[in-house]
């Protein structure tokens, strides 16, 4: 199955992606994670991207589209994938459409995660991320077993530079102006499904998996 997770920063895309990919046996492709890995490894792409990321701006479309095109060519993505954080602009969505339609493997469904703005700000400013493995926690909603340390790898938890108050406000505005138009883009194509993304993480997962099952019963059925 080829799935796009759409929703503002802090909606819980990364959190739900981990669970959805386990249930649907597809790879999780997060453009934010790929960019952060490039920043950590000090690549040229990472150096270019960091300037935009730290300001809460979008990395230019041509850079992102080239990066995703390469990732979708990898063997694990041949029979399906879950895209998280891509596309984020109409030109990116058109480029994705060309890429997958050209191969006869169109996007099956776009899950739009719906959360109030006030809740988003609290989720983003309280988010803590493992500097080693990238796993995501929250100071209140999803605290680690040992304060400041990742439950999985023991790495130090840090606040992302772009989760600071001033950058968060810009990221939400960038979402509103540049990414929200995708809701119409995918609605017009009959692909958009809403998932109410408030409540516990388990409740949201149940809703997301139900939305996918309504489209395709999946491997277990
Ligand atoms: P996104 O990938 O959409 O930016 P994340 O999955 O990183 O969002 O979630 C943002 C923050 O909100 C994280 O700190 C995460 O632990 C927390 N979070 C995710 N889902 C929920 C939820 N259902 N209720 C409360 N907090 C949540
Ligand atoms: P995320 O982890 O999805 O919140 O992304 C973090 C940052 O990476 C964003 O604020 C952008 O600067 C950059 N980024 C991630 N995905 C994209 C994309 N599809 N297009 C442009 N920039 C992106």
Image (cartoon, rainbow, N blue to C red):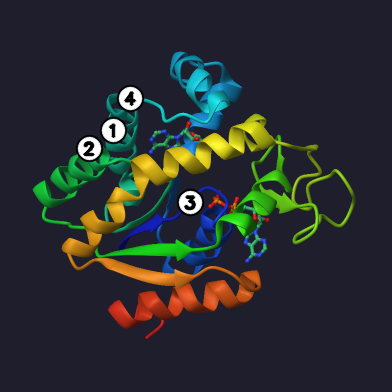
Q: Nearer the viewer, mark 2 or mark 4?
A: 2
Of the numbered discs 2 and 3, the one sitting upstream in the chain is: 3
Residue at 24%, 42% (x, y): give it. 90
The residue carrying mark 3 is: 8
Label 3, secondary structure: give it.
loop
Of the numbered discs 2 and 4, the one sitting upstream in the chain is: 4
Q: Nearer the viewer, residue 131 or 165?
A: 165
Of the numbered discs 4 and 3, the one sitting upstream in the chain is: 3
The residue carrying mark 1 is: 65
Q: CA distance from mark 4 to mark 3?
A: 21 Å
| Res 91 label | 2
CB-based contact (under 8 Å), mark 1 and mark 3: no
Seen in the picture, residue 55 relative to 5 is either above or below; the reply is above
CB-based contact (under 8 Å), mark 4 and mark 1: yes
Determine whether, in the image, residue 35 is placed left or right of residue 65.
Answer: right
For the question of whether residue 219 can be seen, the reply is no
Please state the total of marks drawn on the protein image. 4
Q: Position of residue 164 (x, y in %)?
A: 68, 34
Q: Nearer the viewer, mark 1 or mark 3?
A: 3
Label 2, secondary structure: give it.
helix
């Amino acid at each position: 199955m080829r799935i796009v997770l759409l929703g503002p920063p802090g909606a819980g895309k990364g959190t739900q992606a981990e669970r959805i990919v386990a249930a649907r046996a597809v790879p999780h492709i997060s453009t934010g994670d790929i960019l952060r890995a490039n920043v950590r490894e000090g690549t040229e792409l990472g150096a270019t991207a960091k300037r935009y990321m730290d300001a809460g701006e979008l990395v230019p479309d041509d850079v992102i589209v080239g990066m995703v095109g390469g990732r979708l060519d990898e063997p694990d993505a041949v029979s399906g994938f879950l895209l998280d954080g891509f596309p984020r602009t109409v030109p990116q969505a058109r480029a994705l459409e060309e890429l997958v339609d050209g191969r006869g493997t169109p996007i099956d469904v776009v899950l739009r995660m719906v959360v109030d703005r006030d809740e988003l700000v609290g989720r983003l400013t309280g988010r803590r991320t493992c500097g080693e493995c990238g796993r995501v926690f929250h100071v209140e909603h999803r605290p680690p077993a040992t304060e400041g340390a990742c439950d999985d790898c023991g790495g130090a938890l840090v606040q992302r530079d772009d989760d600071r108050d001033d950058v968060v406000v810009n990221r939400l505005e960038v979402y509103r102006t540049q990414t929200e138009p995708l809701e119409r883009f995918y609605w017009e194509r009959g692909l958009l499904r809403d998932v109410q993304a408030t409540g516990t993480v388990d409740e949201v997962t149940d809703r997301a998996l139900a939305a996918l099952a309504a489209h395709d019963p999946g491997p277990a059925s």
